[in-house]
Image (cartoon, grey):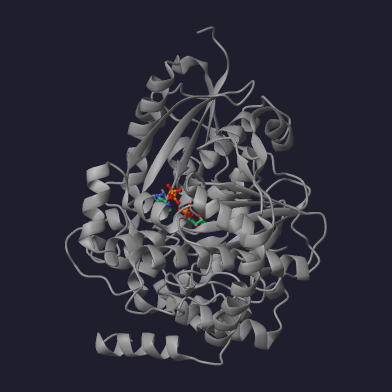
Amino acid sequence: MASEPLVVGVDFGTLSGRAVVVRVRDGAELGTAVHEYRHGVLDRALPDGRPLPPDWALQVPQDYVDVLKNAVPAAVAAAGADPADVIGIGTDFTACTMVPVKADGTPLNELPEFAGEPHAYVKLWKHHAAQGQADRINALAERRGESWLPRYGGLISSEWEFAKGLQLLEEAPAVYAAMDHWVEAADWIVWQLSGTYSRNACTAGYKGIYQDGYPSPEFLKELNPDFAGFVADKLDHPLGRLGDKAGTLTAEAAAWTGLPEGIAVAVGNVDAHVTAPAARAVEPGQMVAIMGTSTCHVMNGDVLREVPGMCGVVEGGIVPGLWGYESGQSGVGDIFAWFVDHGVPPEYHERARERGISVHELLTELAAEQRIGEHGLIALDWHSGNRSVLVDHELSGLVIGQTLATRAEDTYRALLEATAYGTRVIIDSYTDAGVPVTELVIAGGLVKNALLMQIYADVLDMPLSVIGSEQGPALGSAMHAAVAAGAYPDIRAAAGAMGSVERGVYQPIPGNVEVYERLFVEYQELHDHFGRGANEVMHRLKALRRAAKGEK
Ligand SMILES: Nc1ncnc2c1ncn2[C@@H]1O[C@H](COP(=O)(O)OP(=O)(O)O)[C@@H](O)[C@H]1O
Ligand SMILES: O=C(CO)[C@@H](O)[C@@H](O)COP(=O)(O)O
């Protein structure tokens, strides 16, 4: 292979990290490799067996470094590339995955005195145990009329930096006191690569409530007097713009990755947001849905509007010069996986095994044989709470319409449909707020499920475009590496040369659209009934569960 400049992108997902080697000239993906996190998600117990309460989700930072040590060299080898041709590395992470660290970046769980302390571990994005703190943040912000609240659709999520930080303070004051920085894993990994702590503007804006400044010390003091210094003491740090160079690869990280010391390391970024340029969706109205464990919806706009229940709007949050909007569904593939693991009888598993396909594929095949509405079910997709538009992680899942004739494929199909209705609620909220969605581009692992895609096209009554890459986030990260290395002047230019999309791959089918329109009306009724206060049964059940388990 003739020598050409290459870049490496690394996508840190919920369960694994994926590296891809990309040609700078045209975005060709030459080699890729995945490394599963050894500890996965700690949602039941710490590595030493100490049990965790419900709604907790922790990780072990060393697992991220193992991705650098394993997936990066494996991707370079798979590409048959000469590491000397690599001019930069870029990374993206799940967002608001938070690492408590000492001043030198050492995670607190690596200190012997905190090894058995849950709060010293990484709080993964889907750690949902800070809902109480989020509720207090929201109530106080509303009462004080905080100007930043509408930028987050009127509600701050329990997934975010302030709710998780306040939980840390209130439940483990000693850990909070020992922590020098409360760091996004997106920035921690860049710190490991470059030796420099650079806080990326994307997570600071969306997850760290940074809008022309952070929430004031007075606000924080009212939440909890000991929280007054949270921003100044634990959070605040110079911001790095997306596509900037955070620093250069250290000798240690060069040894881990096999890449040349001194190459550009891009400022950290978020899995969802880097995917927009990878899908060439950098113009206003082009929404990208990154569908996997969860779904993130990101879109640029040329106007600032307050969209109810959005995760946030940040200037330059996706590409410089435009308002970047984000919404999301906390559970999508996760819900399908839960059903496969806990709701599907053994004979289906057996059949799938015999045929050498996954249970997802088997259920999808069976569900595809049905006419719309045939299963007689409607589900609410809140098994992991609701991130948009209700922003409430105390909500839970529901399937209505079950009878003795209901089969696993019926419920599976109802769950697929429920997530499509959830997306429709989000898209409608943008349109109603004056930021219309003109195109939906699908990225992420779920794109492979053609039935799911057709359901989305029909429920949304919208053609679906599909990203040209199977590793959208990793490609997007590689593009940011190319910009950081100076190969392109900005991310738009890199998107034009290196991104790819196939337009109109799934078209709505008029007869289907009509039936789904009727079913969506039913979904919306259930959505508002259980989600907007008419019936608080989901909250009461969670409270009962907590009481039964002897928790606060
Ligand atoms: N054929 C399928 N149909 C629907 N969902 C699937 C299928 N295969 C896997 N999944 C779900 O996809 C999710 C993984 O998506 P992926 O994009 O690979 O991961 P991540 O979001 O962690 O990057 C899992 O939650 C899994 O349950
Ligand atoms: O929260 C965000 C983006 O803001 C995501 O990082 C989070 O939903 C995780 O996404 P995945 O489902 O792991 O791809």
Taking 351 as reference, is 246 above or below it?
above
Which residue: 53% across, 42% down? 473
Tell me where residue 346 sits by quadrant.
bottom left
Task: Tell me if 529 is positioned left or right of 124 in this view.
Answer: right
* Horizontal arrangement in the rendering, residue 487 relative to residue 354 (left or right): right
On the image, which quarter does residue 130 sit in? bottom left
Q: Which of 259 and 446 is in front in this view?
A: 446
Q: Given the current orientation, which residue lies at the most extreme left position?
A: 49
Could you say where residue 391 lies in the image, as x and y percent from the top left?
56, 75
Q: Residue furthest top?
A: 2
Q: Which residue is drawn at 46% across and 55% down?
A: 368
Numbered circles on residues, count:
0
Residue at the (37%, 36%) spot, across then down:
34
Residue nearest the viewer, comparing 300 with 362: 362
Q: Name the side, left or right, on which 121 lies relative to 531.
A: left
Depth order, front residue of 346/201: 346
- Pick the quarter of the image with the C terminus: bottom left
Residue 371's x, y, as percent?
A: 51, 62
Q: Position of residue 212 (x, y in %)?
A: 73, 63
